Amino acid sequence: MVDDLESRVRKTGLWLYQLIEGETPSIFKKEYWAGKVMERCMKDEAFKVEMFRFVDVFPYLTRPQSVAKHLVEYFCRPEQDFPPALQWGLRLVSPTSIGAQTAAKGIASNIKNMGKQFIAGASPKEALPVWEGLRSQGMAFTADLLGEAVVSEKEAEEYLKRYLQLFEILDEAQKSWDPLDAETGDLDWGCVPKINVSIKPSAMYSQMNARAFDYSVSRSKEQLRPIFRKAVEIRAHVCLDMEQNDLKNLTLAIYRSLLEEGEFKDYPHTGIAIQAYLRDSEQDLKDLIQWGRKRKQRFTIRLVKGAYWDAEVVWARLRNWPVPVFTNKHETDANFEKLALYLLKNHESVRLACASHNIRSIAYVMEMAKELKIPQEHLEYQILYGMAEPVRNALRKAGISLRLYSPVGKMIPGMAYLVRRLLENTSNESFLRQSFAEGISREELLKNPLEFLHQETSSPDARTEASEYGDKGPFWNEPLWDWTLSEHRERFSKALSKVRKRFPHKVPIFIGGKKVTTGKEIDSTNPNDPEQVVGIAASAGKEEAEQAIAVAKAAFSEWRDIEPRDRAEYLFEAAAQARKMRHELAALQVYEVGKNWSEADAGVCEAIDFLEYYGREMIRLAMPRRMGRVPGEMSHLFYEARGVAAIIAPWNFPLAISMGMTSAALVTGNTVVYKPSSQSSVIGSMIYKVFQRAKLPHGVLNFLPGPGSEIGDLLVTHPDVALIAFTGSKEVGLRIIELAGKTPEGVIHVKNVVAEMGGKNAIIVDADADLDEAVVHILQSAFGYQGQKCSACSRLMVLEENYDKLIKRLKEAAESIELGPPEDPKHFMGAVIDTGAKKRIHHYIEIGKKEGKCLLERDMPDSIGHVVPLTIFTDIRPEHRIAQEEIFGPVLAITKVRDFDEALKVANNTQYALTGGLFSRSPENIARARREFRVGNLYINRGCTGALAGRHPFGGFKMSGVGSKAGGPDYLLQFMVPRNVAENTLRRGFAPMED
Amino acid sequence: MVDDLESRVRKTGLWLYQLIEGETPSIFKKEYWAGKVMERCMKDEAFKVEMFRFVDVFPYLTRPQSVAKHLVEYFCRPEQDFPPALQWGLRLVSPTSIGAQTAAKGIASNIKNMGKQFIAGASPKEALPVWEGLRSQGMAFTADLLGEAVVSEKEAEEYLKRYLQLFEILDEAQKSWDPLDAETGDLDWGCVPKINVSIKPSAMYSQMNARAFDYSVSRSKEQLRPIFRKAVEIRAHVCLDMEQNDLKNLTLAIYRSLLEEGEFKDYPHTGIAIQAYLRDSEQDLKDLIQWGRKRKQRFTIRLVKGAYWDAEVVWARLRNWPVPVFTNKHETDANFEKLALYLLKNHESVRLACASHNIRSIAYVMEMAKELKIPQEHLEYQILYGMAEPVRNALRKAGISLRLYSPVGKMIPGMAYLVRRLLENTSNESFLRQSFAEGISREELLKNPLEFLHQETSSPDARTEASEYGDKGPFWNEPLWDWTLSEHRERFSKALSKVRKRFPHKVPIFIGGKKVTTGKEIDSTNPNDPEQVVGIAASAGKEEAEQAIAVAKAAFSEWRDIEPRDRAEYLFEAAAQARKMRHELAALQVYEVGKNWSEADAGVCEAIDFLEYYGREMIRLAMPRRMGRVPGEMSHLFYEARGVAAIIAPWNFPLAISMGMTSAALVTGNTVVYKPSSQSSVIGSMIYKVFQRAKLPHGVLNFLPGPGSEIGDLLVTHPDVALIAFTGSKEVGLRIIELAGKTPEGVIHVKNVVAEMGGKNAIIVDADADLDEAVVHILQSAFGYQGQKCSACSRLMVLEENYDKLIKRLKEAAESIELGPPEDPKHFMGAVIDTGAKKRIHHYIEIGKKEGKCLLERDMPDSIGHVVPLTIFTDIRPEHRIAQEEIFGPVLAITKVRDFDEALKVANNTQYALTGGLFSRSPENIARARREFRVGNLYINRGCTGALAGRHPFGGFKMSGVGSKAGGPDYLLQFMVPRNVAENTLRRGFAPMED
């Protein structure tokens, strides 16, 4: 029967092909500009990259000379060797020349036309004639509103308004429409409304976040209810689209939850999409159908393959998450058939909208529907507007119920959609490309995808790269929790109550493995509830500091001399222990230093990263490097520990930075006296606990909570301390460097100081920046963890062309951020660390008000914590104090700049050089920023916080530090001294010879 | 005719083979221990290395348990996988066990037997019966006296005595000898004396040095005269042997010069060896024969192939000199035939002693002699005693005049000879191995070597390794002058007079490319003649220092921003300019700072090395390093200049260290204010001159001679100086570090200090050390450049087992060193830098006399310079001031230690950790020293000075420096700050994908 089915599928497929013999999708027609460009994109990956990027930035370019400039930058760079024809005659001409601008105009109009190919119109009004034309040809449609990313609640409201407007227009229009293929009633094909609208869930709530899952669902539903009410009112079909996988579980939850509400629970004309490329899709589908059966009301599932494949793979890799999609196209195709069959078998409960351009997939569904005798009204086919016209024609000729997915929108939002479509068309694995551009045989294309699966074993997920870390394998960053999974949310909630129950945690000093108390104590309280004592730490004085140093000194030589690989193993074991304690370690940071769930989780991952990375780095550095290559001599360079290290840690990354400095000192063979910040001694003690569980020998790590004013100088100036690793303020850092610079008589080392200090970091927003991205990242960089990161963005340079638009969106987005205690996962920002910080930040806000204009000052009036307002100033001049001094709080200073030159000048104009950011799509400006935006860590088209070990070696220069880079390949070198051993291997005229 | 000759050679060869059908050289006989060992050596290179090394150290081991310990260390290391049989049952047993010592005794006796195979006896008396036995079998012999290296004039005298004794014994004995094959007279074969002695020229003068060529010749002749007189007296043949190529030109000169003297010019019974593996040998031979014709007296040339092939290749590579030998064995064979033919053709002037074991070579000579009708008395054949017995037998059976080369000597010197013989036997290309151990066909072995040359193109000299420096290619150290070539000696002499004529050199300040004078001046004088003013430098004050910093600051941003590769090109051009000025640059160092010729030359080479190495390193570091490997992100780590660098340089390496620090600062993009030492401002100005000739832009390098007391602090503390590179004393270094640690308000960088300070370096002489090597290297390390190197050896730890012997040889050797002004190339050591140094060193000598015993105090009474005695103290305890404080002069403190533990403890027991040395042949002790002898640069079995860029990254820790390593891969990093740029490459869900 299977063979029989296969041959019928093939037959049907061939028949569909015959129906459209000789046709080609417009996009591949080489006589047109678009066809030529597509052809080149398929042949030349480098050109495709530039083309898609240009298409992406193009609608932002308001002036012809700007288009010309970008064309030159994208296609005429000296290192490129595109044929002159693809450089549109622009090489060597000035972008301001008339010739260039004429060429630019031509290309602009071609790109616009390419956009029009896929987009029915800029507005529903404009699209209406197109849709009516489709209907007159016997095809239904579904309308989709393209839009920029919704980054604020204002934008979400506007989006809602656009949907309501769309419904009004369609309702008005439908009155004159005859139903398609209906014998009775006013429904198309006798069963579905003439109006069909697709909705993007991401547009419903600007702060949608899986961490605050239920809250996000509830806020989204608030927005969706009027839409659904309107749909019910005018009997329209509403379908929730599926976007990126991050939103999938939320979308499913929103859909189900909304349709369980009384006013909608009996409404049959709704739908949701399922993406067959997701490995989870089968389970999701089964859950949905089960839910649908319980609800006892039919609904539609639009079965698609998925349009974010490239992005999903990249996102997963960037986060070191499992890739959620099938990585082999044939797996997706096979899964599509499997899910389609499952849907057909359940056609009594759910209606299938089969949305594919793949003739094999379509033929399979047609044959299975025949086989299972599915009534025609239980099944429809969907095709994207402007794509795959031959397939559309075949289906029409085959007399099948067909709906076109038809987006409406302006140029800017349209381009994201256009790029997805172009990508789909030009992908190597695209059915359309294979069918219509490459002429792969029909027989081949109609094969059962399972056949290919048996043949192929390729997997782009295979991480086969050679490791510089020997058998330990490459380093990968610890993945953050995926909050879309309920188990993580629940476990984190439980961890919060668990650590809370133990308040106040008792924190002793540990010297040589023994607990020490001193009678003196330091309380550590919750910044969001200062009455709540999180922990009580023993407070070390000079005597304990001396003891700790003596113990560390005694432990030094043995620890230095064990195999580096064995030291690294302690770090790996500590990483394993930290993983086990992961929720607890994160939960403590919520209470003791006021991090939100995600920041707290990231802190733990970063700590684990340092352990795994430095452990590996030590393996690499432990391999002596051969110097020179002459016979008769074996010369090797290697490294050795310095001695006792004093680690003086900050409170803002109480786990990650402490762990980084401590593990670096330990793995390189130094012994450690670790002084946590007094504001975070409980988390500090966790560093000790993790290493204790990893069975680190006693005395190698000593834990010394205590006031810096009492023991700080002693640790720095003690003759037996060879190395100081410090992260904190510029003032303290410079003092340490100065003190350490004095080498008293009788001391036998020059102290080495690894110091990370402050920052006054700027982000530049270029005239062509993608504001969808920029706004979100700026907010995260400036206000994430209340701006209490040395990497935080505290200055913004915006080019005047983009200024008004950015300021508006940024302000509205900042107004949409949820404020409040971070215990509640919906809160993005809470209290600052202590009253001192609060006072200092308030002081700077007062200064800011005098120096510039206050764009926004959002208070948290109900909070009992050390709260300060989220504050944004505009009209800030570079020399203003607010633009020069580190505030370390949620205060952002904005400066409008004329051009990119000025932006760079202003950005560089501080005593600090830690992080920086740039949002730009100009290759030239990006290249300039690489060279001339002189900071330790520059981030392009992303936020300026969140450096990852191994990927973004972190640290600055000027007053930001001494040029070390945590999490980078040079970091451990600072904790060691280099040694060289050269052996003359020639004896009696005989030396071992090498190959 | 050629073909005909070839077939006759082959026929003769085959006939010789037939004569010895079935015979095998003893050394290959597998039934014996030696045969088994040889077989294994041929199969397993690793075993061969250990075996030869063990053989080398073996005679030094006086106790069975010491033999057992070494056997275990050589053959039973955990990482080795020799078959148990080759571990002699020693694995897992203690070296002190009876079993181990029994095994050791067995092996000891086997090795002794192996030695006896090649050595006729421990003394002439012992050997006499052997020789007489040879004569009774119809073979002549030549006696060779094996000896340890002659490191002192005492040892040279003793050697002379041994030769005279040998003559006495032989003269006494010859009275009873019948001449061989002589029809008339008392000469063997009617033409040569019965007594034939071979002499090693290296034993004639302990300080033999090509630099002082004529002096070395004259001193050697003084020693040789009595030997030649004796030979004339008793009518013996004397042959000068050829040793390593370094001595070749000296040996030829000694031979010719001596035989031109009246008393010897008519004596016919002398000879000299020519090594056919030397590329120069043909020219040398022709010169010799021409000389002989003029002299009108016959002499003999022993034509050998050469026994130091491995060593010559290694030595040349180590020095980056052209390899003097043919690298293809067949080239040597072909050259041997060519030279033999040339000799035969000149048989009227010169007698050929054909010394080869290669049957093809022998057959060729036999056939050519026949062809040219050479009288039998014009030709003899030589074979080494104990080697190639079948060849010997064949020649005897062929009735040919045969002489055996027969060494006499004790175990220790014998072992060097034994290793050479073993090496010869086991080499892949050994004719004996191929003939008798591998059974390669006779046809093949008898082929004309020229035939192989056409087939083979292999060259071990091809330096094909991939370069990390891109198209610039790998780094190789600048080769020192080869003083054996007269052109170099002559050019250096001329350069000395040339620079002397320009005294006093006028040295201005250079700021921004302009000459500046100040009215104030500093004289720079010749330490060996303080009246002689070498130069007069303008003396900069605070005003000029400010100006220079301002100019450097102004030049900074442009210089920083040019392509790193372009900056590197300035260094390469500077290197080219320095090469052109090489003799002048070296000559100045002889006068201004008192370096001897070789030290001065080495200083120039080192300066060139820094230019070539740092230029390349910058090319390497300029390549941004990709961080992480995730799609959607491009993250790169790279480096950028810090700002204005103050370079504060010492006088002791006025060119090399100045050039190193300056070029590192420049190539990394910093601009420089360079302050030379006031004692060496003329050479300092040469740094400027070299860069000026390389067309470095004005202002990038500023030259600021002036007193440290006036401008030092200003340079260090100036707010615009970001970086200080200093080499000098601990006191000044610590002061700089302390001053630089203070960051005044308003300064926007933390100053970075690269500081190299003092040393108190020790060499350990283990119980099994090769004293031939140790003595020479210790003297060079302790007294080279008067001990005025931070790397100089100033302490010696000697294990008591070796103590007396070492002290005796060291003292005698130190007494043999030539002292005096370095202008004269024979002088090894001259005056110290100035009166201050002289006073300080004298003061320490007084202290030393109180603390220990003065072993040697050699004055330079006739000198008018700042001279101090070469001084050695013994009985020094580790805590003595003389063992703790840096003296920076020619003073060596010796401590006797019980064992290696104590040696390491004492060696590490100082505040410094710069260089160290170890002479040992114990693999275990070498491994321990690698780990536990904690200094920046440890040298094993070589001296502790003379680090080469790229091969020995140089620098120490503790009070010796801050852990930088000049000439190493981490050095340039200190001159820069790291930057990271991470670009999010994902746009609209699309990111360029990588393979």
Image (tube, coloured by chain):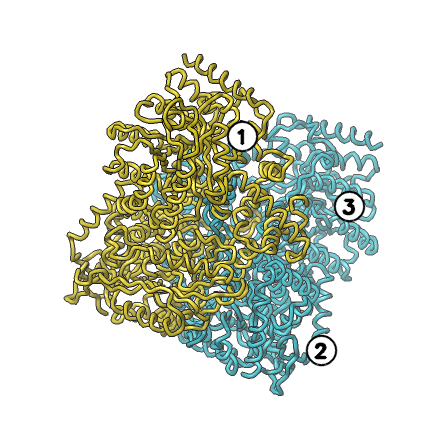
Chain colours: A yellow, B cyan
Q: Are marks 2 and 3 on the same chain?
A: yes
Q: Which residue is mark 1?
A: A389
Q: CA distance from mark 3 to mark 1?
A: 101 Å
Q: Residues within 10 Å of mark 1 (few under 14, many from 20)?
A: some
Nearest the viewer among A702 and A342 is A342
Q: Which mark is residue B204?
A: none
> Gap between marks 2 and 3, in whole Å?
53 Å
Chain designation of label 3 = B
- Residue type, numbered disc 1: Glu
Q: Say which mark, if any, is on residue B502.
A: 2
> Residue drawn at (72%, 37%), measured in percent from left and top?
B453
Marks 1 and 2, how far apart in space?
91 Å
Q: Earlier in the sequence, mark 2 or mark 3?
A: 3
Left or right: where B579 falls relative to A605? right
Q: What is the x, y in percent for residue B73?
A: 42, 45
In the foreground, B669 or B36: B669
Q: Position of residue A80 (x, y in %)?
A: 62, 47
Amino acid beneath label 2:
Arg
Disc 2 residue crowd, few under 14, some 14–19, many 20+, Cα 10 Å: few
Residue B276, position in %: x, y?
71, 45
> From the viewer's perspective, is the residue at label 1 or at label 2 nearer?
1
x and y, in percent, of residue A768 in the image: 52, 55
Q: Quadrant of the N terminus of chain A?
A: top left
Identify the residue position indicated by label 3 in the image.
B351
